[in-house]
Image (tube, helix red, strand yellow):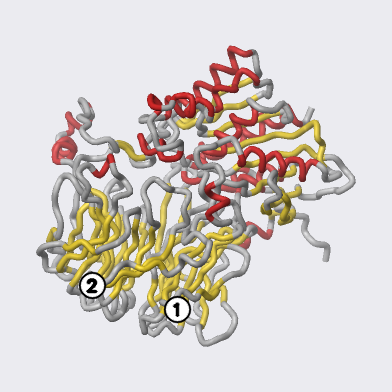
Amino acid sequence: MPTKKKRLLNAHDLYGFHLISQPQISPCGEMAVYCQHSVDEKTEKKYAHLWAITLPDGKPRQITYGKQSDTSPRFSPSGKEIAFLSNREDEKQQQIYLLPTDGGEARKLTDLKGVIESFSWSHDGTRLLLQFRAKDAEEIEREKDEEKKKLGVVCREIDRVFYKEDGTGYLPHERSHLLIVDTQTGQVEQLTEGDLFDETDPAWSADDQTVAFCSNHSEDPDLDPDAIDLFVIPAGGGEMRRLPTPIGPKYNPSFSPDGRNIAYYGHEGKGEGWKNTRLWVVPVDGAGEARCITCEHDFDVSPWTINDMGSLPQVSPTWANDGSAIYFQVAHHGNTVLKVVNLAGEVSEVIDRDGVVGVFSFDREQEQLLYFHATMKDPGQVFLRRMNGGDDRQLTILNAELLEQIDLGEVEEVWFKGAAGNDLQGWIITPPGFDPGKKYPSILEIHGGPRVQYGNFFMHEFYYLAAQGYIVYFCNPRGGQGYGEEHSKAIWNDWGGADYDDIMAWVDFVSKRPYIDQKQMGVTGGSYGGYMTNWIIGHTDRFSAAVTQRSVSNLISMYGSSDFNWAFQEEFGNVSPWEDVENYWRQSPIKYIGNAVTPTLVIHSENDMRCPIEQGEQVFVALKRLGVDTKMVRFPDEPHGLSRNGRTDRRIARLEHISGWFDQYLKR
């Protein structure tokens, strides 16, 4: 029987993909639960439901239904209930619900007004510990009055420097605090309060008597954002106590099983974002100093591998039951892997195959490991490993039927030499039906960040462009994470230096392939990748077309207008523009825009609070004045992350504008 010919991936396939997040294994190891996400094409609404699997070999079954989003499932210590977040009663307000694992209706537990940012069960199952940010009282009152609700906000009074957040909007005056909720009655007790400090990343001690959390208690936390300390407080309320730790950012504390130590992530020093995130351990009694147990290893303790089909949350340090070792994720050489380190700093691999490890969890006895894993050709599945040996078993086959219909093309991973003789990693995607004897137009993709990495993670955008007949190629130049601190630090206060040189070395390498049409080469990137696209069109006429997305163009006007606010200055000599305007101008692509001749499409979201839209506007207007072919496409209501989590019809329109622009100039 002849094999059915596969079709090409298209932009509308975004509606067909169902994505997995937050897999969790029950304490007894007999059940797994995860979220499955989908989009309603008619309404453009996004939904998520809980699915369960009876272990070890059951089939996935849906356990929540309806037009809502059910997310963040967490098994109770007994395994008899699942706590989760849902907006089933109010589309704009999530609450915590409890669902019996043996069947039955979910029970609403909370009735809060604000954002439940995280929650976790106490070990005895009687309480939940929440990180919660309340709505401002005036907003709650406005929502009660239909006339005031229609009129909307009259004005905003701003009295803090960090007052907005991309994807969230304008922040309330209320801060993030810790709450404890009784799992039987829903009664709420507030553990911390105040209008100056945020308390984040709370964690229970093994005996449920103490809570650890992170907070910045400097005089004005917004003016000293890296001054984050680790605190403990009695779970019943009382005085908090700061633990002695090195100055610098820190997060995700986790108590050891015996309660004597806390592991956390962070790095030492302020304003040094190029540094690797490390794993640290500090005694709870404050009798000893914090100790870095991964400092002998030049890797970044992070899950960050870029994709456009979901996120990779960072799992808190996960202690072995005997307290001898800790499990954690690492972004390294294009993969996100799972490692384990003992308290002497000796590191071993747990999951190190090509791809990315997302959320993972153990059963109570740590005999089974449940985890999310995705690859270059699969947006992600749930896997189960028996820790005493045996092959890892895939529990889900989501999107298999869709992907079986599609020819994605082929992916080649290569290592090459950068501009300084440095080793660099890149990938080349060839179109479906690729003929090495033909010449193809190509598109260079540049990642954002900059301190992230591309890697072995499904990218719908790349396969879509390959399906349009393009060679799509991407790499990890100096400036990103995943290749050690020196690689990351190479562009500190020198954007457009080593990164540009490495990218051009990559272009040289790929352009020598016999199938590359050197006269039909395009370039695109978003965020920092948009910065580099702007930089490139001002420094070379090598490309026949460019698409700059959610870009940075002018570091001077960027100051204070981004949700990163003034803290951008840490990257550029850690002085403000008025103290060294020439340094900011030297590294601003708009300085060199007068050299541009490359036809350039400018794409920006109107609600982008990370890279404000004026950054793209400056490029568009300059190119118009220069007589360079250009067009601007603006997306209303969308934040910085449109390409990853924007409204699906807008994501599709974005892709079609990108391919249309390249078709116009690269397929003549």
Q: Is residue 89 visible?
A: no
Give me the residue at 62% from left, 49% from top.
476
* Marks 1/2: CA–CA distance: 45 Å
Image quadrant in which you'd find residue 33? bottom left
**10 Å neighbourhood of mark 2: few (<14), some, or many (≥20)?**
few
Image quadrant in which you'd find residue 23? bottom left
Where is residue 92? Give x, y as percent: 29, 45
Where is residue 498? Give x, y as percent: 62, 41
Q: Is 396 in front, or is 482?
A: 482
User: Looking at the figure, which quarter contains the N terminus?
Assistant: bottom right
Q: Which mark is residue 287?
A: 2
Q: Is 22 situated left or right of 526 in this image?
A: left
Give me the residue at 72% from left, 50% from top.
417
Q: Residue furthest bottom?
A: 388
Q: Residue furthest left?
A: 238
Vertical position of residue 660 compared to residue 30: above or below: above
Q: Is 97 situated left or right of 442 in this image?
A: left
Q: Which residue is mark 1?
A: 54
Q: Is 109 in front, or is 201?
A: 201
Where is residue 602? Give x, y as percent: 56, 27
Q: Amino acid at mark 2?
A: Ala
Q: Residue furthest right?
A: 437
Image quadrant in which you'd find residue 580? top left
Q: Amino acid at mark 1?
A: Thr
The secondary structure type at the circle numbered 1 is strand
Where is residue 650? Give x, y as percent: 51, 36
Q: Is 37 in front, or is 217?
A: 217
Give me the residue at 61% from left, 45% from top.
461
Vertical position of residue 456 compared to residue 337: above or below: above
Q: Which mark is residue 159?
A: none
